[in-house]
Image (cartoon, rainbow, N blue to C red):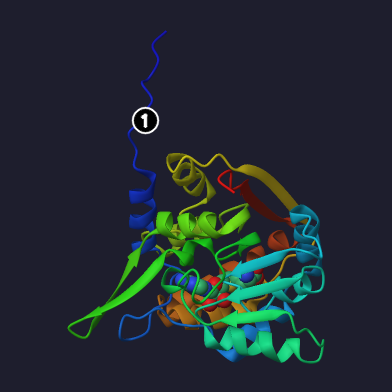
Amino acid sequence: MTHKTLRTDTDWHELWQDMMSKCYAIAYDKNGRLKQWSVSQAKDYLQYSNPEYYQALIALTAVTAEESVLDIGCGPGVLSLPFSKVAKTVTAVDSAPGMLEVLCENMKPQNLRNITCVNKAWRTVQVGVDIKREYDVVISSNSISLLGVREQTINGKTSQDWNLVEALSKMTQVGKRVYVTFRLGGDNDSELFRLLGKDYQPHPNHIILYNVLHQMGIRPNFEVLSFAKRRSDDSAGLLKWLDWIEKFNSEEKEAIMKHHAENERNLLDTPDLWGIFWWKNTNR
Ligand SMILES: C[S@@+](CC[C@H](N)C(=O)[O-])C[C@H]1O[C@@H](n2cnc3c(N)ncnc32)[C@H](O)[C@@H]1O
């Protein structure tokens, strides 16, 4: 019996960078800049969030009343709001002003005074200036793929530089415990792209993320969370998203909506699965 030799020379970060630069699900404006979430999108997003999700993460991180939390790509406060009720302080970082506006709106009525907001993209955040040098818990919840981006405008032309290693290194630099969450489960889009006759360029998945971490010398723990209720899969939300990413013409959108309607029952019956990589910073 012959064995194939396994390739060990894959540069997983290069693969990740290549996939992010081609990924169909990233929304750009007409000037080639990344689109930022609006206030109404942020409100919709918060409304669909599942309380079981933040409860599970509070339990998993075992955050205490003495501890500080850094929530990167915090969105409208899906985690920052509930974590601020159990932690000493929360620093909430997000590149979208609309997301932070909704987070602030929700802080006031709940009288939450221990959240500090930082409206910056993660790679432009300066440690020791915009944020503290150390946090007990650092979280990227459903945001890791975008945290590696840095935009640059040269001669009026904007482009993105994707660097996950830099984003992860900075998280590890400031965190005693680091948590990265991502959605797991069936990839419904690949079949759709086949039906549309289009080339499918997905987000890099958690296997690639794991290998990037491994090549950085980080050996993360892995947890899976399963919820019965999905966050947002209704057709109105899908249509808004398709309009936002502007990657499909009207016939394609119609075909996608039809495909979604035919599969909605399946989607709603499928558990909402989340993966979490987490590690301790051994240098602290
Ligand atoms: C899908 S939302 C996740 C929100 C929330 N963390 C959650 O678990 O539901 C992703 C968030 O990451 C933010 N984001 C994207 N790129 C970012 C970057 N480079 N730096 C900081 N935030 C970023 C987006 O504005 C958005 O609010």
Between 158 and 266, the one lying in front of the other is 158
Asked if residue 121 lies left or right of residue 73, the reply is: left
The location of residue 83, given as percent across then percent down, is 76, 70
Between 192 and 276, the one lying in front of the other is 276
Asked if residue 16 lies left or right of residue 115, the reply is: left
Q: Name the residue at the top extreme.
A: 1
**Badge 1 density bin: few <14, some 14–19, many ≥20, Cα 10 Å:** few
The location of residue 120, given as percent across then percent down, is 48, 79
Going 21% across and 86% down the picture, which residue do you hit? 156
The location of residue 253, given as percent across then percent down, is 48, 77
User: Which quarter shows the N terminus?
Assistant: top left
Q: Is residue 200 visible in the rendered structure shown here?
A: no
Q: Quadrant of residue 54?
A: bottom right
How many numbered marks does the figure carry?
Answer: 1
- In the image, is the residue at mark 1 within 8 Å of ligand 1 by its beta carbon? no
Q: Quadrant of residue 107?
A: bottom right
Secondary structure under tag 1 reads loop
Going 61% across and 46% down the picture, which residue do you hit? 279
The location of residue 189, given as percent across then percent down, is 52, 60
> Which residue is disc 1 drawn over?
8
Please say if 263 is above or below 131.
above
Q: Is residue 90 visible in the rendered structure shown here?
A: yes
Q: Amino acid at mark 1?
A: Thr
Asked if residue 226 lies left or right of residue 8, the reply is: right
Between 274 and 235, the one lying in front of the other is 274
Q: Quadrant of residue 6?
A: top left
Q: Quadrant of ligand 1?
A: bottom right
Going 70% across and 91% down the picture, which residue do you hit? 105
Please say if 90 is above or below 185.
below
